[in-house]
Structure formats: C-alpha cells, structure tokens
Amino acid sequence: MKKRRIIGLSLAAFAFAYIFVAGKLEAARISTPLEGAAVAAGPSVGTALLMEDLRALSSPALKGRRTGSEGSKLAQAYIAKRFGELGLQPYGAGYAMPFSFTHTSIRGLVGVGKSFKTKYPAAVNLVGYIKGSKEPGRIMVVSAHYDHLGERDGVIYPGADDNASGVAAMLALAGHFKAHPPQHTIVFAAFDAEELGLRGAEAFIKALPFPREQLAMNLNLDMVSRNDNNEIWVAGVFHNAALKELVAAAAKRSAIKVKMGHDKPFLFAGTVEDWTSSSDHGPFHDVGVPFLYFGVEDHADYHEPSDVFEKVNPVFYSQVTSLLIDVAVTSDQKLDMIK
C-alpha cells in the first residue's frame, strides 16, 4: 500500500508540474502580437455612425437589454431599423426570429426571492443577410449578442463594451459589404440571451434558415471596444489552422496589436483560459463550423454598472472595427479554402 501511495503522489506531482509548465509556455507563446503596421492601412470606418450606434445600444433608456425586458424590445427595434437602413434581406417576413427556453440558476437555490428556473418565452434573434455575388450558396455568419445583464436592485448595467460594441461593429461590417458586395452570402445575426448561456446562438444553430451544408464559417464579435494596451484577441485558429493566414494578413494592415490564443484545451494550455465556448461562437464550434472570435480581455468594468459609453476610446474602437472589416473581407475572398 505504501508503494501505491508513493506512485500516486508521484503521478500527482507530475500532473501538477505539467499543468504549470504548459500554462507558462502557452502564456509566453501567445504574448507576442502578430506583425502589424505602424500606421493603420485597413478599410476606412465611419467613426461617427459607429459611435452613434454604440451610444444608442448602451443608452440607459434600454436598461441593460436583459432578455425579455422592455429594454430588450427597444434594442430589437433599433437593430431592426438599422438592418433595414442597410438594406439587409430578411429570412421570411422580418428580421426577428423568436425562440423560447428555460434558464436554470444555481443562485436561485441559495438566493432569497430568486427562482431556480425561469422561463423566457419571448427571446428574439435578429437576422439579415447580403446575398453573395458569385457563390451565394456558401455562407459566413457574422454574429454579436445584443443582450446584457439588465437592471439589478435599481442599478442599470449598460453593457457598452459587452456587447453593444460588438453589435455596432457588426452594423459597420454590414454597411461595408452593402457598399462592396461580397462574393459569398454574409448573414448578420444579433443574438439574444448570450448572458443566459449562449441561448440565442444555440437556437439559431438548431433552426438554421438555410441548409446546414452551406454554413462555412462564423465570425463572432464580443467586447471589442476597450483595451488600455491597444490589444485585441482572436481565438479559433487552434481549431482551424487555415484561419491564421486570414488574421495575419489583416493584422499587417492594422495598428492594433492582434494576439492569437485562448483557444487551446486544458491539456495543451494548462491554466491559460480557453475561450472556445465563452461566447456565441461556441455552438458553431460544437457542430464543426470554423470560427474566429474577436474580443478584449476582461477589464475592471466587465459585468459592472460602470461599463458605459463614455469609457470607450473612439480611436481604438474604430481601428478594431477596421481590422474586423478587413478580416471579414479576406475571409470572404478565401472562404472556399476554409474547411
């Protein structure tokens, strides 16, 4: 028995050492940004409209856009209006794709006056598309969730960076492709209920408005407007190495520091966080769809009432949006290479 205990302790020590070393190596690997440009040379971005969309979606009047709330309905109306102004085509009579679900909360088991199960009968995704000029039957989905935490104990959580920023950037991408038609069809999806467990993305994948075999790629935008170090992260390359070329090409035309990582499982990356299922790209990955996820690292205002419009740096945000447009354009041009 003593020998078995020694062997068990040795294995535990080896496992701990492996995890520690793997984490250190991965953290060092991903710390170096891709080759960039001293001066941004990517697509131009209408900063004024970008910031106006961000301001509108993070307005206190929307009260944090919690799924099922009146603020959520106001956000839906704004996004649908902008989709219409951009000339996106709907699947069916309108952009709204309703769905329902039941959310279970561990907090509800211990919190006074809180429910363990909450039904959400009227969640809504908003989806529009631009038809491809050459190969309309091959599709890239650009996604960003519009919901946030709502109002808690009378305090509004505006969610400017998380994720009004992703939705406003997505609208800028739609504007670019409306002016410069893509080769392949691009679907723009504003997902609901991401904060409640990626529910909107899951509902979309379960009831695609087009044949599953046409879905080639997901470009997901979640928290893209704030970083004090001029950095943006992209995950997804580990799962599909062909995507690295697309990101690297766009990075060379950007003054933003583009870092790749946070997409390796625990076995490969140790303690370095794996973001593969952290946002709406997760359900796409689960069904084998290649994805690129762009987002900043968490900041002090993440999931706080202080995540407000006024803290967004317009220069950084517009340059990130330019990078995202560049990545989307390059992906459209190379979409047939992505498997």
Image (spheres, rainbow, N blue to C red):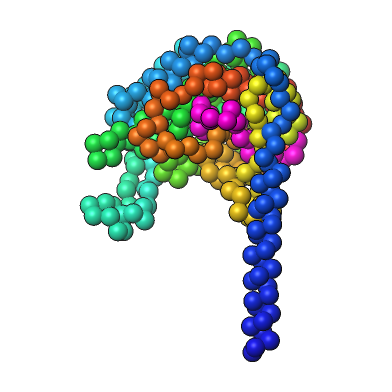
Q: Is residue 25 above or below residue 32?
A: below
Residue 335 visible to the viewer: no
Residue 227: horizontal and vertical position, in percent? 53, 30
Query: Residue visible at 53% across and 22% down?
Result: 317
Query: Residue visible at 67% across and 52% down?
Result: 24
User: Horizontally, is 66 left or right of 16 in the view?
Assistant: left
Report the quarter where the C terminus lies: top right
Q: Is residue 13 magenta?
A: no
Residue 283: horizontal and vertical position, in percent? 55, 43
User: Horizontally, is 196 left or right of 2 in the view?
Assistant: left
Residue 49 visible to the viewer: yes
Q: Is residue 210 above or below residue 266?
A: above
Please provide the residue range marked out in magenta.
Answer: 219-242
Q: Is residue 11 above or below residue 124?
A: below
User: Toward the viewer: 139 or 104?
Assistant: 104
User: Toward the viewer: 160 or 197?
Assistant: 160
Report the quarter where the N terminus lies: bottom right
Residue 80: horizontal and vertical position, in percent? 42, 20
Q: Main secondary structure of the magenta part?
A: loop
Residue 119: horizontal and vertical position, in percent? 33, 46
The picture quadrant where one finds residue 293 is top right
The picture quadrant where one finds residue 147 is top left
Q: Farthest residue in the bottom direction?
A: 1
User: Toward the viewer: 293 or 73?
Assistant: 293
Q: Is residue 229 magenta?
A: yes
The picture quadrant where one finds residue 64 is top left
Query: Residue visible at 40% across and 31% down?
Result: 307
User: Horizontally, is 270 left or right of 337 in the view?
Assistant: left
Query: Residue visible at 45% across and 33% down?
Result: 162
